[in-house]
Amino acid sequence: MAADSKDCNTNVNALPVVDLSGLVFSGPGSIEWKQAQKKVEWALMNYGGFDAIYNHIGSDVVDGLFEKVVPETVKNMEKISNASTLPTSGWLIFGDFAFNGLHIYDPDSLSSLEDYAKTVWPQGNSLFW
């Protein structure tokens, strides 16, 4: 079963909501478990995250789900994340696009601001600097 947007509650400005509450009565390999894995995978691939609802579920069940889904979903993340020498702080994945998260390490330091500007605009930007 492939998950899509109708399987997860979504809002234009919010992460998908995945309800894991039904897993309390099922275990790995069950239909409910596989459906939850697909929903989590879809949310991670399309939004880079999700809000999980897991009322009355033990942490062992939730941990088991994440241990199986997350490595499969982001198995190529190490290759992607080590591809750049830019000072990045992570990735934001939206649909098929991965965006580097840049940040200013020390906003009170002039040299830190200059380094950031050189990273964003290697050829310079007279409107900014």
Image: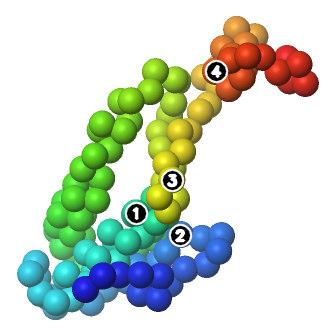
Q: Is residue 113 left or right of residue 49?
A: right
Residue 15 visible, this orientation: yes
Chain-order first, disc 3 or disc 2: 2
User: Which residue is identified by label 1?
Assistant: 45
Give the quarter of the figure containing the N terminus. bottom left
User: Mark 2 and 1 residues: CB-CB less than 8 Å, in contact?
Assistant: no
Q: Mark 4 — residue?
A: 119
**Residue 123 in the image, given as x and y percentages of width and height:** 73, 16
Q: Residue at x 88, y 19 (%)?
A: 126
* CA distance for labels 2 and 1: 12 Å
Q: Amino acid at mark 3?
A: Phe
Using the image, tell me which numbered label, if any, was put on residue 15: 2
For the point 30% across and 53% down, the residue is: 74
Q: Amino acid at mark 2?
A: Leu
Whichever of labels 4 and 2 marks the residue nearer the N terminus, that label is 2
In the rendered structure, which disc, 1 or 4, sits on the residue that comes first in sequence? 1
Q: Gap between marks 4 and 2, in whole Å? A: 30 Å
N-term-proximal mark, 3 vs 1: 1
Q: Amino acid at mark 4?
A: Thr
Disc number placed over residue 97 in the picture, else none: 3
- Residue found farthest to the right: 127
Task: Using the image, determine if residue 99 lies above or below residue 52.
Answer: above
In the image, what residue type sits under mark 1? Met
29 over 91 or under it: above or below: below
Q: Earlier in the sequence, mark 2 or mark 1?
A: 2
Left or right of 60 on screen, residue 87: right
